[in-house]
Image (cartoon, rainbow, N blue to C red):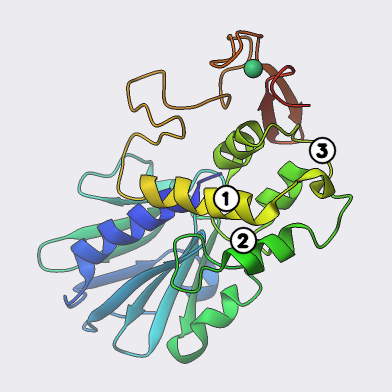
Amino acid sequence: MPEGDTVFQTAARLRAALAGKTLTRCDVRVPRYATVDLTGSMVDEVLSRGKHLFIRVAAGASIHSHLKMDGSWQTGRVRAGAHAVRIILETSDTRAVGVDLGVLEVLDRAHDLDAVAHLGPDLLGEDWSAPRAAANLTADPDRPLVEALLDQRVMAGVGNVYANELCFVFGQLPTAPVQRLPDPQRLAAQARNMLWSNRLRTNRTTTGDTRRGRELWVYGRGGQPCRRCGTLVETDRHDARVTFWCPSCQR
Ligand SMILES: [Zn+2]
């Protein structure tokens, strides 16, 4: 599951590759949109909202995609089998290929953002509001913290890495009810700071240390000593989601 900063970077990369250029090829390999051909149209803008991407084209169309679990947009050399390719966009000098996208649809540009109307404040967007995110976060007092953090209707952009790291930083178990948070707005603000400071980085860090193997507090560190207290980090798998926590620092 990608984090909002990954999607933000993908949008920036696609913008650099496509914006202001005319499409010389548009090959949509999703049955429902297979007949859509935007060849000859100019790409106006590329934007991200939470984990959603929009490629807006002058013809009045907007290509909406979501990476979901394993999706990616690749420019340059493509590392994927033909069966995984969902869309190919080419200009005279660039190519962007959507691989394994969880969502791919071609929308009417005038209403494309309806597809993300359900999202909470975008952590990397102009609509960001910590008070609103905090109110959403605590709307259901008994809800487990990690679950609320991952709910894109609460705030848009947190994936499993940030959800686990935020629980650690605030000393809360991932399963703790959100009502335990002494200051939900501070957590929302910290979530924004984490994503914002990583939005242009390729090596994501929440510890402030970008050296290899030191970037994160607990995520991916099951069985390793906590960076703060030395207790072994615990891990648990629930459906497709893995959680990590320090049993001493998080109570
Ligand atoms: Zn610890």
Side of 191 relative to 170 (left or right): left
Considering only vertical position in the picture, is 28 above or below 214?
A: below
| Disc 2 and disc 1 in contact, CB within 8 angstroms | yes
What's the residue type where badge 3 is placed? Ala
Residue mark closest to the camera, 3 vs 1: 3
Mark 2 = which residue?
155
Tell me if mark 2 has few (under 14), some (14-19) or many (20+) residues whose alpha carbon lies within 10 angstroms of its own: many
* Ligand 1 quarter of the rendering: top right
SS label for mark 1: loop
* Amino acid type, label 1: Val
Q: Residue at x 69, y 30 (%)?
A: 243
Direction front: furthest residue: 182
Residue 42 can be seen, yes or no: yes
Which residue is at the front of the view, 92 or 50?
50
Q: Dot 3 surroundings within 10 Å: few (below 14), some, or many (20 or more)?
A: some
**Distance from the alpha carbon under mark 3 to that under mark 2:** 18 Å
Residue 72 visible here: no
Neighbours of disc 1 within 10 Å: few (<14), some (14-19), many (20+)? many
Q: Position of residue 242 (x, y in %)?
A: 68, 30
Q: Mark 1 vs ligand 1: CB under 8 Å?
A: no
Compare residues 146 and 27 and report the one nearer the observer.
146
**Could you tell me residue 68's position as x and y percent?**
56, 51
Name the residue located 73 percent from the left edge and 65 percent from the top edge.
135
Image quarter of residue 28: bottom left
Pointer 3: what residue? Answer: 176
- What amino acid is at disc 2? Met
For discs 3 and 2, the disc positioned in front in the rendered view: 3
Return the disc, 3 or 1, that comes first in the chain's sequence.
1
The Cα–Cα distance between marks 2 and 1, rounded to whole angstroms, is: 7 Å
Which residue in the protein does label 1 denote? Answer: 158
